[in-house]
Amino acid sequence: MDLFEYQGKSLYANYDIAHPNSFLVNKIEDLEHGFNLNYPVVVKAQVQVGGRGKAGGIKLATNNDELITYTNEILGMDIKGHTVEKILIEEASDIKEEYYLSFTLDRSEKKYLMMLSAKGGMDIEAVAEENPDDLTMIHIDPSKELDDDVLIDAITNSKLNQDYQSDLVTIITRLFELFISGDCDLVEVNPLAITSSGVMALDSKVSLDMNAKYRHEDFDQIEKDIPIPPSEKSAKEKGLNFIKLDGSVGIIGNGAGLVMSTLDVVAEYGGSAANFLDIGGGAKAETVSAALEVLETDDSVSSVFINIFGGITRCDLVAQGIVEATKGKDLKWPIVIRLDGTNATEGLKILRDNPNEKIIITETMNEAAELSVKGNR
């Protein structure tokens, strides 16, 4: 579960991670109650998407009039399809140097991965692509602590300011503790900055592992504070494995691996997925019908790609679910279908015996991906 910046910084407080003083605003009237911050302050839109600064979602206010003006401007702003409902007002920092730091899990190595760079404030993808030598990557054995000597070497190799070595070791160690003890999938700070007040985490990008929810009483409240897209809420109620994405091709498949492959092949043909929707092994007609109902709640979907490889799942039952879910309906979008495996012949016959002008049957995964992308245009 991806957190808002203000939620990540509330976790910082639990681990004594230095960050600027701040105040959360839900509505303009919240400013009337006053707050104990010193000007200038940064007015920051709270959205779970990058590029908010370029979109006008971050402003520097030097007095109360500017603060009110900027708060009014940013509340309700649309940033890449995300409506700003909360604002974090934060004391501005006198920044001397900006660094990048993150902790995540490298599944291929079965180890934690720390990434550190002296080029903070930039997209780390751009740093990795254009200047890979400026990015230090350290794998950490999950059975061991983050060794101070390893950390000092990383700080040195990354060409961070040696005058602040001790403070850097302290804050990085605490961020690693948050990553481990907080059961996080990701802890990213960009920038981790040297300021006139010392080393501070000026930003927060934290993702929690919800499989560890039973260990953390606060996860429930954190989750409640995060708006759920209608399609995701509908999927959750129906017991479907669904993740909302930013594209426009609706994806339905059986098995996480197949769905991931489907996302990749759609991308190869120039499209982008609107979702990850895994109906699981042994899916029946009711499951397929429920999956299509979920996609109907998502206005970003322009076409649907149903990709089924029957093992435990019977393709004839999937086909029956598609027929039941679409019969007599004026479909919002074309549905491209690829069936293979158990009872695929029977499934394809069911579809052909119940024709619909917006349902397209294909032979291969590549053909289906290409047509689903074309149907989007």
Image (tube, helix red, strand yellow):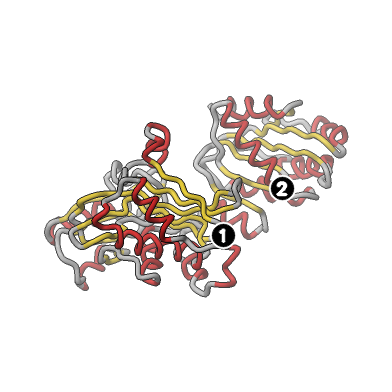
Residue 279 versus residue 18: which sits nearer the camera?
A: 18
Query: Residue 29 placed where, x, y %?
Result: 24, 67
Looking at the picture, which amino acid does disc 1 mark?
Answer: Pro
Q: Would residue 129 appear left or right of 248 to someone viewing this image?
A: left
Residue extending farthest front? 149
State the image quarter where residue 63 is shown: bottom left
Q: Would residue 312 appear left or right of 79 to someone viewing this image?
A: right
Q: Residue at x 86, y 39 (%)?
A: 342
Whole-angstrom CA distance, mark 1 to mark 2, is 42 Å
Q: Residue at x 27, y 59 (%)?
A: 199
Q: Would residue 215 appear left or right of 310 to someone viewing this image?
A: left
Looking at the picture, which amino acid does disc 2 mark?
Answer: Ser
User: Can you tell which mark lies on residue 13?
Assistant: none
Query: Residue 97 placed where, x, y %?
Result: 24, 49
Q: Mark 1 or mark 2: which is in front?
A: 1
Query: Residue 153 placed where, x, y %?
Result: 39, 51
Q: Is 12 rendered above or below residue 70?
A: below
Element under disc 1: loop
Query: Residue 194 placed where, x, y %?
Result: 24, 55
Residue at the spot of label 1:
142
Q: Earlier in the sequence, mark 1 or mark 2?
A: 1
Element under disc 2: helix
State the image quarter where residue 337 is shown: top right
Q: Residue at x 64, y 29 (%)?
A: 369
Q: Would residue 221 appear left or right of 375 to someone viewing this image?
A: left
Residue at the spot of label 2:
289
